[in-house]
Image (cartoon, rainbow, N blue to C red):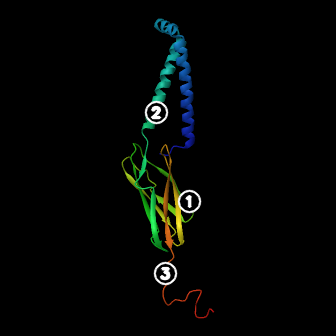
Amino acid sequence: MNVPRSFIIYHSSFINISFEILQDSLRFVIINRTKFVRDFKNQNSLVMKKLFFVAVLLMGAVFAVQAQDAKAPKMVFEAETIDYGKIKEGAEPYRVFKFKNIGDAELIITSARGSCGCTVPTYTEKPIKAGESGEIKVRYDTKRVGPFTKNVTVTTNEKENTHVLTIKGEVLKAEEQQGVPTKSGGVFNN
């Protein structure tokens, strides 16, 4: 279940407004507590009863929202950095980041993006249940010679919803085959 950011912002502002109303209600009750108790006992004040009822409802709503926040997914990676080391040009391009959902709710990966076109992540698109594992497979273009450090940004439905994974290494130029002329130093090049 992917919860839009606007939904979270709307409900968090609702909670803030609810807290303000609750504080004002409780402040009014504390200031007028003797009258409140007397009126409540005599059942003469319908307004006070409504105010008390609204305060109880707001407290219940706040506790319910907090209880929902307690059930959340939590993504933990075995490693957030993978070092390819020194590899030959055209070598195996794939590496796998393994993770586990140690939270109480389903984990959903909404996106995984490489920092450039040479880094292409693929990921588990189905929800990962609590206690289960998943993986993000990253492909680096090993035809690009030289050192590299690239990032993959993973976005999820967690409270802290982004993770930055890193791949690094160095691609060494492949050795040329013997007996095959190169561009420079060929038979017809002087």
Specify the amino acid type for callout 1.
Ser
Instruction: Compute the Cα span from label 3 to label 2.
Output: 61 Å
Which of these two is toward me, 76 or 171?
A: 171
Looking at the image, which residue is at 41% across and 43% down? 105
Specify the amino acid type for callout 3.
Glu
Which of these two is toward me, 28 or 42?
A: 28
Nearest-to-viewer mark from 1 and 2: 1
Residue 86 image position (x, y, % from top left)? 46, 70
Numbered disc 2: secondary structure: helix
Q: Earlier in the sequence, mark 3 or mark 2?
A: 2
Residue 129 image position (x, y, % from top left)? 39, 48
Looking at the image, which residue is at 54% across and 17% down? 27
Specify the amino acid type for callout 2.
Gln
Residue occupied by mark 1? 115
Numbered disc 1: secondary structure: loop
State whether residue 134 is above or below residue 89.
above
Instruction: Compute the Cα span from label 1 to label 2.
Output: 36 Å
Query: Marks 2 and 1: in contact by CB < 8 Å?
Result: no
Nearest-to-viewer mark from 3 and 1: 3
State whether residue 94 is above or below residue 13.
below
Looking at the image, which residue is at 53% across and 61% down? 150
Q: Residues within 10 Å of mark 3 (few under 14, many from 20)?
A: few
Residue occupied by mark 3? 175
Numbered disc 3: secondary structure: loop
Q: Which mark is residue 66?
A: 2
Q: Which mark is residue 58?
A: none
